[in-house]
Image: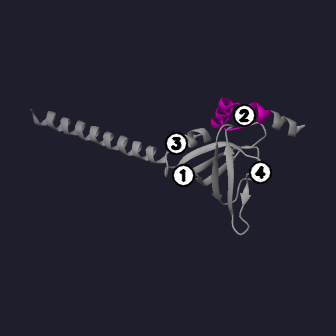
Amino acid sequence: MNPQRKKRLYIVLAIVAGVGVAVALALSALQQNINLFYTPTQIASGDAPQNTRIRAGGLVEEGSVKRSGDSLDTDFVVTDGSHSVTIRYSGILPDLFREGQGIVAMGKLDGSGVMVADEVLAKHDENYMPPEVMQALEKSGMKQKHDAATQGGAQ
């Protein structure tokens, strides 16, 4: 093999190795930042991983919001119509957060099945609901009840 071909081979190998390292780093970063959506039914059946950041959503059950008197801790129950999950959040809840409305919480499940959320997102107008929550409600048959309650309250 002549020296010029050898030099080209080394350059090509260096480029391939560099691209390989870049792809590996990108995949590693994406894997660490992914947080999948789980419905309360999936969480209750054990499909959701513990101690891994996930998103969970559904409707906040009526009468389930319990606020701590001396801190910003709040516990509430989210349902998809067939199962429920308790969510514990420490912080200021969004202005649009209320019972009977759709929310998405991001956090980790603890050993007792309670989701410890570090972020809670509420829907931003009376017609919008996150697509994942909408699909979960449609599957459970709760969407019609939610639509009727929303339209009844808007009139």
Q: Is residue 153 left or right of residue 123?
A: right
Label whose residue precedes the other's in the sequence (2 or 3): 3
Camera-side mark, 1 or 2: 2
Q: Amino acid at mark 2?
A: Met
Q: Which residue is mark 3?
A: 46
Q: Amino acid at mark 1?
A: Lys
* Viewer-side label of 2, 3: 3
Q: Residue at x 37, y 40 (%)?
A: 23
Q: Amino acid at mark 4?
A: Gly
Rendered location of residue 153, percent (x, y): 86, 40
Q: Which residue is mark 1?
A: 108
Task: Tell me how far mark 4 sits from mark 2, CA to CA.
Answer: 17 Å
Q: CA distance from mark 4 to mark 1?
A: 24 Å
**Residue shown at 44% from the left, 44% from the top:** 31
Q: For the residues marked 4 and 3, what is the alpha-carbon distance in whole angstroms?
A: 26 Å
Element on which disc 4 rests: loop
Which residue bears the numbered disc 4?
Answer: 63
- Does 141 lie within the magenta span? yes
Q: In whole angstroms, how far apart are the C-alphas of marks 3 and 1? A: 13 Å
Classify mark 2: residues with Cα within 10 Å, few (<14), some (14-19) or many (20+): some
Q: Which residue is mark 2?
A: 142
